Image (tube, rainbow, N blue to C red):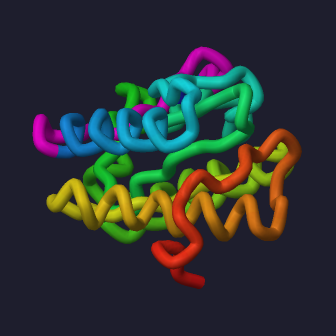
C-alpha cells in the first residue's frame, strides 16, 4: 500500500477565480468605497487572513479603516494542484468553499475588520447607495475602531 502524499498547506494561497466582469466590478467597488471614505481600498492578502495555514485574499481591504469588501456571489476558487481533487466532487468542493467563506468572515471579525458584503450590482448609483448605507450603519453603531464619520446626507441614509 502506497503512503499518502503529505501536503504542505503553509505554502498554499487560495484565490478566487474571477471573470473579467467580476474583476472590473470589484475594482469599481474599491473605487467607490475609496471615494466615499477618502481612504484607498486594495485587493490584498493580509498576513492574518489565513484558513488553517493557507493564505486567503481580500476583495478590497483598507488597513487604516479596518474595513473589507467580500464578494458573495457563488465563487469558484483557483485551487492549487494539491487540492484539485475537490473539483471532482461537487459536494466536497461546496463544503470547502463554504469553510473558506466562513473562515474569511471569522478572521476579519477576530482582527477587528468590518466586512461589507457585495453582490453583483451593475448600476453605479445603486452600488454607491449600497456602500453609503452600509457605511452609515457601521459608523452609526461605531462597529469598528477608526471608523470614519458618515459623509452622506441624513435623508439619503436608510436603516
Q: Residue at x 52, y 32 (%)?
A: 57
- 15 is within the stretch colored magenta: yes
Task: Choose between 23 and 49: the one closer to the eye.
Answer: 23
Whether residue 1 is visible to the viewer of this picture, yes or no, is: no
Q: Residue at x 59, y 84 (%)?
A: 159
Instruction: Tell me where residue 151 appears, x and y as whole percent.
Output: 59, 52
Instruction: Tell me where residue 119 appears, x and y as whole percent.
Output: 33, 64
Q: Residue at x 52, y 81 (%)?
A: 158
Q: Is residue 25 left or right of residue 30?
A: left
Task: Choose between 99 and 135: the one closer to the eye.
Answer: 135
- Residue at the extreme top of the image, as rendered: 11
Query: Which segment is the magenta one?
Result: 8-21
Question: Looking at the image, is 159 positioned above or below residue 95?
Answer: below
Whether residue 109 is visible to the viewer of this picture, yes or no, is: yes
Q: Is residue 39 left or right of residue 66?
A: left
Instruction: Tell me where residue 32 appears, x and y as whole percent.
Output: 38, 42
Amino acid at each position: 500500500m502506497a503512503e499518502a502524499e503529505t501536503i504542505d498547506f503553509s505554502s498554499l494561497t487560495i484565490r478566487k477565480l474571477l471573470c473579467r466582469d467580476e474583476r472590473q466590478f470589484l475594482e469599481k467597488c474599491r473605487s467607490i468605497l475609496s471615494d466615499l471614505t477618502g481612504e484607498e481600498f486594495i485587493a490584498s492578502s493580509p498576513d492574518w487572513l489565513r484558513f488553517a495555514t493557507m493564505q486567503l485574499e481580500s476583495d478590497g481591504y483598507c488597513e487604516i479603516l479596518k474595513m473589507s469588501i467580500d464578494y458573495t456571489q457563488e465563487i469558484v476558487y483557483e485551487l492549487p494542484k494539491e487540492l484539485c481533487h475537490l473539483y471532482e466532487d461537487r459536494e466536497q468542493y461546496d463544503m470547502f468553499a463554504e469553510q473558506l467563506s466562513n473562515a474569511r468572515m471569522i478572521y476579519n471579525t477576530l482582527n477587528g475588520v468590518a466586512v461589507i458584503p457585495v453582490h453583483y450590482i451593475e448600476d453605479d448609483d445603486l452600488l454607491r447607495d449600497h456602500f453609503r448605507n452600509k457605511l452609515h450603519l457601521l459608523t452609526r453603531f461605531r462597529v469598528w475602531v477608526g471608523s470614519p464619520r458618515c459623509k452622506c446626507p441624513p435623508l439619503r441614509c436608510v436603516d
